[in-house]
Amino acid sequence: MPTKTVIFMSFIMASCYSFADCIDPQTPSVVDGNTASKEAMIEYKNNIKNYMFLSKSYLTCLQQAEQSDELSKPKIQGGYTEHSSSYVDKVSQMEAVKNDFKQQVSNFKSR
């Protein structure tokens, strides 16, 4: 297959998103800042960073799926599609994870 065709097909395939292709990352376990070691807190921080990175990728995927399905998917209650509802839920979950992390860091530092 010619190189131009391979590149073009790769571009087309990459632009064809569906909601099923979007992988929602698992929320990391909360570490108790009152009792955790420094090493456990560093690992927790790294897990949170990874979760946030994967969550942002998930949100991007939802946006792209939303755009590709915009004309073919019916709206659900409140004018949101399935994608945008999942997007809002994920943003709320990310905010809760961030707040939990900040609280545990505060607990750790106050010991």
Image (cartoon, helix red, strand yellow):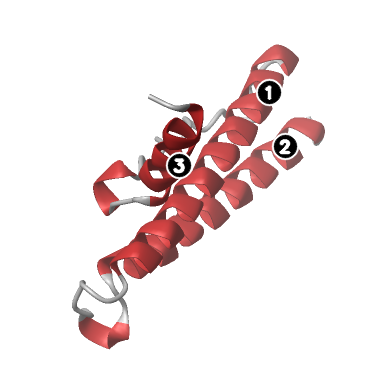
Mark 2 → mark 1, Cα distance in angstroms: 8 Å
Residue displayed at 50% across by 59% down: 91
Q: In the picture, residue 34 is in which quadrant? A: top right
Taking depth in this image into account, of 100 and 66 the one nearest to the observer is 66
Proximity of marks 1 and 3: CB atoms separated by less than 8 Å: no
- The three-letter code of the residue at mark 3 reads Phe
Give neighbour class at mark 3: few <14, some 14-19, many 20+ (Cα, 10 Å).
Answer: few
Residue 88 appearing in the image: yes
Proximity of marks 2 and 3: CB atoms separated by less than 8 Å: no
Mark 2 → mark 3, Cα distance in angstroms: 47 Å
Write down the residue under mark 3: 8
Give neighbour class at mark 1: few <14, some 14-19, many 20+ (Cα, 10 Å).
Answer: many
Quadrant occupied by the C terminus = top right
Give the numbered dot on residue 41: 1
Residue displayed at 32% across by 73% down: 70
Proximity of marks 2 and 1: CB atoms separated by less than 8 Å: yes
Quadrant occupied by the N terminus = top left
Question: Which of pointers 2 and 3 indicates the residue nearer the eye?
Answer: 3
- The three-letter code of the residue at mark 1 reads Met
Give the numbered dot on residue 105: 2
